[in-house]
Amino acid sequence: MSHIYDEHETLGVLRYVVQQKGPQHVYQRHQEVGYVCLYYDRAAGCPSCLVGHVLEQLGFPPPPASIEGRAVRTIIDGVALTDFEAYWTEKFTSRAIHLLAVAQDSQDGGETWGEALERAERRYRAWHPVGSA
């Protein structure tokens, strides 16, 4: 069985990606292909959105083209298609998926990656308050 990333590891990688790209970075949608979010830009040969960069940093190969345009949130909302849900749940815990969804929702709403990270950090702190056992 391969490693499954939890919310601690996932948040750490989100922080790293935002630091590398810059907190003021704003994701530019790939409207020519009709997607709100492109995890991996196959034409350019590199990750595209915030979550795509996280996947690359964790060493995952480009995700299958069949999941492009589908938001991580659909897993949480219970409307994910089987192949899409399996792609994420084989790699991340439910809390890690939730953090990625929060960051992706923020990014797709036009916020900077720094703001997306702050939203994910707020969710993380709600689960792990300072001083709690």
Image: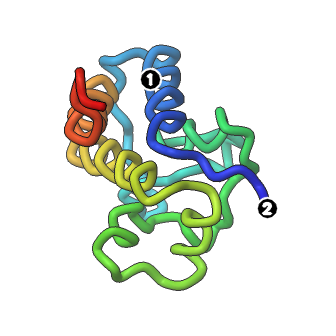
Quick check: 113 left or right of 110? right
* Image: 39 above or below 110: below
Mark 2 sits on what residue?
Answer: 1
**Residue 72: x and y, percent?**
41, 61
Residue depicted at x 27% and y 50%: 105
Q: Is residue 84 visible?
A: yes
Which residue sits furthest front? 133
Q: Is 132 rendered above or below residue 36? A: above
Crowd class of label 2 (few under 14; some 14 to 19; many from 20; radius 10 Å): few
| Viewer-closest of 47 and 61 | 61
Q: Amino acid at mark 2?
A: Met
Which disc number belongs to residue 15?
1
Circle 1 SS class: helix
x, y percent for residue 27: 37, 36
**Direction from residue 72 to residue 82 in the image, left or right:** right
Q: Quadrant of the C terminus?
A: top left
Q: What label does residue 29 carry, if any?
A: none
**Amino acid under disc 1:** Arg
Q: Residue at x 30, y 41 (%)?
A: 107
How far across and down, in percent of the image, does residue 53 sit? 56, 37
Counting from the top left corner in percent of width and height, residue 131 is at: 23, 22
Among the 4 quarters of the image, the one containing residue 110 = top left
